[in-house]
Image (cartoon, coloured by chain):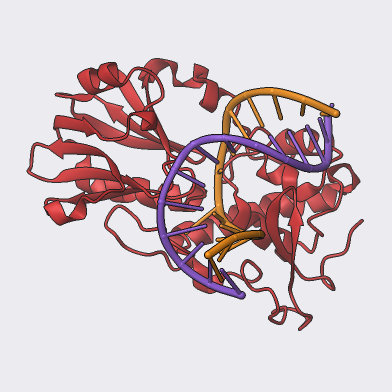
Chain colours: A red, B orange, C purple
DNA sequence: ATAGCTGTTATCTA
DNA sequence: TTAGATAACAGCTA
């Protein structure tokens, strides 16, 4: 489901609805959801109060008042819903957090790829998943000086490099296609062939794309919904993702879909040429 | 009906 | 380093 803008939208929804709430009960219906000891997870989370909700790249950080944080990754189709209605719970509801206001925070995940783990809040930077993340768009570390060396040391195609969360983080399959279209770079261009201007353009396009997508509440392509059950609007503004066989909005050439690094990849063969 | 696709990531092999 | 396969899982579509 989510790339960074979708996770950010979920974060904002959660802040509105669950910040300050005490978790009175936890039910884990799919133990593999939890990385680490499930019993300990339940024990430590139960009775704590949600202090705040943070985010690092595509990781949601649910900060508890007991010094621990739930690190939650939605992977492909993870979703949070807040509801007091029992019908909101179905066979894909894998974690249910009961709150002190009668509402339930329900984690749904059709494909069961998402994961949660408990970690010391003070030590998040040392968490294996968090520690290796590269700079993310809209952060102060997302600069040409930081990014250029991380990008051009790779000979792989640029699309794969941009999806590599250790190079830069937060971008996923949809927005990488959009960004490369915007800056007129072919997704299979070797990363070390890019000029300084290309890199600069990618940085700027990443920032504006993320900003726009967050403002639109993310993209709902197949299943994404925010914590209030709302769809995003950004899918209406996409230029190439899912637009194969339709005309490029810039030049009219038919958008094509190929596979790059195993991922479906959309681009304009006229605007975007390999360097 | 079956094969192939899907917004992610970790891990293993060559 | 990199490319590719595989795995986790379920549902949708051609």
Q: Position of residue A67 (x, y in %)?
A: 29, 17
Task: Name above or below for residue B10 compared with residue A109.
Answer: above
- Number of marks in the rendered image: 0
Q: Is residue A139 visible?
A: no
Where, quadrant-wise, is the C terminus of chain A in this rendering? bottom right
The quadrant holding residue A37 is top left
Left or right of residue A85, residue A58 in this image: right
Residue located 50% across and 20% down the image: A125
Q: Is residue A133 visible?
A: yes
Q: Nearer the viewer, residue A11 or A115?
A: A115
Left or right of residue A162, residue A79 in this image: left
Q: Nearer the viewer, residue A11 or B9?
A: B9
Q: Position of residue A166 (x, y in %)?
A: 65, 32
Q: Nearer the viewer, residue A45 or A37?
A: A37
Task: Name above or below for residue A228 compared with residue A42.
Answer: below
Q: Nearer the viewer, residue A114 or C13?
A: C13
Residue located 84% across and 47% down the image: A196
Residue located 13% across and 38% down the image: A99
Task: Name above or below for residue A78 compared with residue A69.
Answer: below
Task: Name above or below for residue A136 compared with residue A238.
Answer: above
Q: Position of residue A64 (x, y in %)?
A: 26, 26
Q: Position of residue A44 (x, y in %)?
A: 23, 18
Left or right of residue A147, residue A61 in this image: left
């Amino acid at each position: 489901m989510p790339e960074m803008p979708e996770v950010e939208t979920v974060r904002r929804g959660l802040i509105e609805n669950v910040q300050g709430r005490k978790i009175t009960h936890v039910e884990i219906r799919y133990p593999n959801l939890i990385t680490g000891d499930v019993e300990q997870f339940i024990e430590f989370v139960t009775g704590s109060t949600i202090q705040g909700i943070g985010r690092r790249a595509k990781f949601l950080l649910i900060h508890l008042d007991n010094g621990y944080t739930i690190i939650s990754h939605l992977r492909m189709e993870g979703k949070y819903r807040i509801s007091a209605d029992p019908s909101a719970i179905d066979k894909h509801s894998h974690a249910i957090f009961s709150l002190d206001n009668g509402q339930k925070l329900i984690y749904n995940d059709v494909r069961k790829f998402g994961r949660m783990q408990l970690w010391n809040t003070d030590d998040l930077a040392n968490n294996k998943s968090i520690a290796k993340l590269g700079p993310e768009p809209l952060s102060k570390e997302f600069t040409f000086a930081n990014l250029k060396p991380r990008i051009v040391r790779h000979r792989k195609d640029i699309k794969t490099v941009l999806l590599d969360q250790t190079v830069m983080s937060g971008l996923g399959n949809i927005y990488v296609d959009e960004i490369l279209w915007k800056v007129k770079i072919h997704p299979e261009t070797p990363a070390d062939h890019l000029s300084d201007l290309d890199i600069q353009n990618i940085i700027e396009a990443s920032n504006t794309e993320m900003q726009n997508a967050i403002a639109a509440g993310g993209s709902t392509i197949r299943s994404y919904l925010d914590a209030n059950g709302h769809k995003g609007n950004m899918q209406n503004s996409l230029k190439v993702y899912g637009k194969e066989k339709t005309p490029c909005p810039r030049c009219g050439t038919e958008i094509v879909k190929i596979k790059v690094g195993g991922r479906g990849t959309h681009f304009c063969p006229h605007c975007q040429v390999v360097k």
